[in-house]
C-alpha cells in the first residue's frame, strides 16, 4: 500500500511539476517553403488545374514524338518509318525549342492565372493574413512563397521538360556533332523560361493584390495581356513607327527568346536590349505592387 501510495503521489499531482523550458531555436529562412507547400496542396487536387496540366503535358509528349521521329530518321534514313515521316518538318534545332517554349507559354499563362488569381485576394477576404502573420512569418516570407509557387509550377512545365528533351535527343543521336549543336540550348531554355514564367507570375499576383476576387483578377489580367499584345502592333503599323512596339510585353519576351535561340525571324523590329529593359522594368513594377500590399497587411495585423 505504501508503494502504491508513493507511486500515485509521484505521477498524479501534475500541478507540482514545472514545465520544461523551451530550448529550441527559431528556424529562419525556410518559412516561405511552408507557404509553397500549402499552396501546392490547395492547387493540385482541383479538376480545372489538372485539365490545364494535361494540356501542358500533351504538348510535351508531342514534342517528344517529334524528336524521336527525327532521331530515327537520322540514324536510319532508309527505314520504312523514315520514309513515312520524311515529308514532315521534324528537324531538331534551337528553333524547335524556341517554338516549344513559345507555344507552351500560352498554356502556362492559363495555368498560372488559374493558380494565382486568388492567392492574395482570397487570403485578404477570408482574413487569413491574420493567421499567417500571427506566426513567425514575415511579409517577405509570404511574398516569396506565393511567387515561388507559381514560378516553380511554370518552370516545371517549361524549362524542366525542355532540358529533358535535349538530353533525350543526345541519347538517341549520340555524337560530338549533336553535343556541339546542343551545348548552349539548356542555358537558352532556362533564361527564356524564366522570362516567360516570372513576369507572368508577377502580373497575376499583382492583380490579386489590387483586386478583391478571383473573377475580377482573371478578367483584368486577360484584358491587359491581350491589349498589350495586340494594340502596340496595330498602332505601330498605323503610324509606321516601330518604337511603339516596345509597349508589347509578350512581344518583348518573344523577341528576347528569338535572340537567345538565334532564330532568324524576330517578333519585333527592335533591339533585344530594349525588350530586356521593358520586361525587367514591368516586372519590378508588379513586384513593388505585391510587396506594398502584403507589407501593409502585415502592419495592420
Image (tube, rainbow, N blue to C red):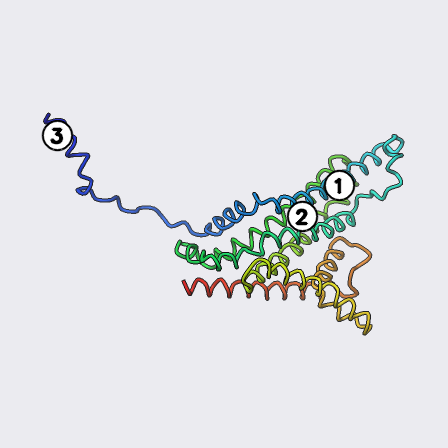
Residue 225 location, quadrant: bottom right
Q: CA distance from mark 1 to mark 2?
A: 14 Å
- Which quadrant is home to the C terminus? bottom left
Question: In the visual, does 177 lie left or right of 17?
Answer: right
Residue beneath disc 3: 5
> 249 or 276, which lies in front?
249
State yes or no: discs 1 and 2 in contact (Cβ < 8 Å). no
Tally of numbered tags: 3
SS for dot 2: loop
* x, y percent for residue 68: 78, 36
Q: Nearer the viewer, mark 1 or mark 2?
A: 1
Q: Earlier in the sequence, mark 1 or mark 2?
A: 1
* x, y percent for residue 238: 82, 72
Question: In the visual, does 16 lie left or right of 94?
Answer: left
- What is the residue that sits farthest to the left in this orientation? 2
Disc 1 packing (10 Å; few <14; some 14–19; many ≥20): few
* Vertical comparison of 32 with 78: above or below: below
Residue occupying image coordinates x 69% and y 47%:
186
* Vertical comparison of 6 with 247: above or below: above
Q: CA distance from mark 2 to mark 3?
A: 70 Å
Disc 2 packing (10 Å; few <14; some 14–19; many ≥20): many
Question: In the visual, does 295 lie left or right of 74?
Answer: left
SS for dot 1: helix
Disc 3 packing (10 Å; few <14; some 14–19; many ≥20): few
* Vertical comparison of 245 with 134: above or below: below
Residue beneath disc 2: 158
Residue beneath disc 1: 62
Amino acid at each position: 500500500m505504501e508503494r502504491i501510495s508513493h507511486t500515485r503521489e509521484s505521477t498524479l499531482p501534475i500541478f507540482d511539476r514545472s514545465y520544461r523550458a523551451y530550448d529550441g531555436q527559431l528556424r529562419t529562412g525556410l518559412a516561405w517553403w511552408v507557404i509553397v507547400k500549402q499552396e501546392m496542396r490547395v492547387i493540385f487536387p482541383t479538376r480545372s488545374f489538372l485539365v490545364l496540366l494535361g494540356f501542358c503535358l500533351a504538348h510535351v509528349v508531342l514534342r517528344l514524338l517529334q524528336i524521336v521521329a527525327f532521331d530515327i530518321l537520322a540514324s536510319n534514313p532508309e527505314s520504312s518509318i523514315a520514309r513515312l515521316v520524311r515529308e514532315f518538318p521534324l528537324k531538331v534545332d534551337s528553333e524547335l525549342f524556341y517554338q516549344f517554349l513559345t507555344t507552351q507559354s500560352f498554356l502556362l499563362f492559363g495555368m498560372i492565372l488559374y493558380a494565382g488569381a486568388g492567392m492574395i485576394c482570397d487570403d485578404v477576404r477570408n482574413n487569413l493574413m491574420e493567421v499567417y502573420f500571427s506566426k513567425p512569418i514575415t511579409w517577405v516570407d509570404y511574398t516569396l512563397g506565393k511567387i515561388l509557387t507559381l514560378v516553380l509550377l511554370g518552370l516545371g512545365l517549361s524549362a524542366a521538360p525542355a532540358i529533358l528533351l535535349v538530353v533525350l535527343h543526345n541519347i538517341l543521336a549520340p555524337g560530338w556533332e549533336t553535343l556541339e549543336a546542343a551545348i548552349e540550348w539548356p542555358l537558352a531554355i532556362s533564361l527564356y523560361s524564366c522570362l516567360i514564367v516570372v513576369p507572368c507570375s508577377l502580373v497575376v499576383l499583382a492583380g490579386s493584390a489590387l483586386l478583391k476576387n478571383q473573377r475580377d483578377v482573371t478578367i483584368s489580367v486577360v484584358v491587359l495581356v491581350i491589349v498589350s499584345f495586340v494594340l502596340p502592333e496595330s498602332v505601330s503599323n498605323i503610324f509606321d513607327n516601330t518604337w511603339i512596339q516596345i509597349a508589347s510585353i509578350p512581344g518583348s519576351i518573344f523577341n528576347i527568346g528569338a535572340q537567345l535561340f538565334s532564330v532568324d525571324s524576330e517578333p519585333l523590329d527592335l533591339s533585344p536590349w530594349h525588350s530586356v529593359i521593358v520586361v525587367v522594368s514591368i516586372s519590378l513594377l508588379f513586384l513593388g505592387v505585391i510587396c506594398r500590399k502584403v507589407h501593409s497587411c502585415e502592419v495592420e495585423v
